[in-house]
Amino acid sequence: MAKRGFPMGMGGMGGNIGNLMKQAQKMQQEMMKAQDELAEKTVEASAGGGVVTVVATGAKEIREIRIAKEVVDPEDIETLQDLVLAAVNEALRQADEMAKNIMGGLTGGLGNIPGLF
């Protein structure tokens, strides 16, 4: 009666799993490098014709908010709040787009997995 089981040679499943693990480790290293790169790259967005400007990193960290003196009106705080909100949202949208471009090149179709980035 013949023995049943999996082949034990290097050409069996063990070799494929080893290659898969090496590829996964390489991809992880490249992703970590890309995340470091995103933390250093910045985007800039403004609102109100440039009276409010926000600088954010590709890692979605707000680095700077600049507000022109002429937009500061104690009688109209709501407009200033709206301008800051618009500039922050645009900066974060641009940071998101930058992250998708950088990380999408590494992950191919995997970039569409929710919560991956």
Image: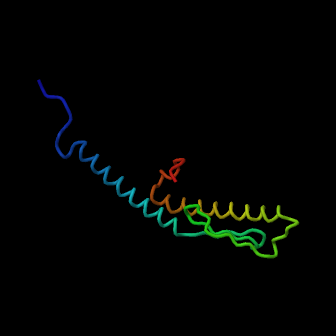
Which residue is pictured at 53% across the width and 48% down the height?
A: 115
Quarter of the picture holding the N terminus: top left
* Relative to 114, 65 lies left or right: right
Q: Quadrant of residue 30?
A: bottom left
Which residue is pictured at 85% across the width and 67% down the height?
A: 74
* Relative to 109, 74 lies left or right: right
Residue farthest to the bottom, as pictured: 69
Residue 90 to residue 109: above or below? below
* Closest to the observer, 63 or 89: 63
* Relative to 64, 59 lies left or right: left
Q: Percent x, y for residue 96?
A: 59, 59
Residue farthest to the top, as pictured: 1
Residue farthest to the left, as pictured: 1
Which residue is pictured at 74% across the width and 70% down the height?
A: 52
Q: Percent x, y for residue 97?
A: 59, 61
Q: Percent x, y for residue 117?
A: 52, 54
Which residue is pictured at 71% across the width and 69% down the height?
A: 46
Q: Quadrant of residue 51?
A: bottom right
Q: Percent x, y for residue 82?
A: 78, 61
Tally of numbered discs: 0
Residue farthest to the front, as pictured: 74
Picture colour scheme:
rainbow
Residue 102 to residue 53: above or below? above
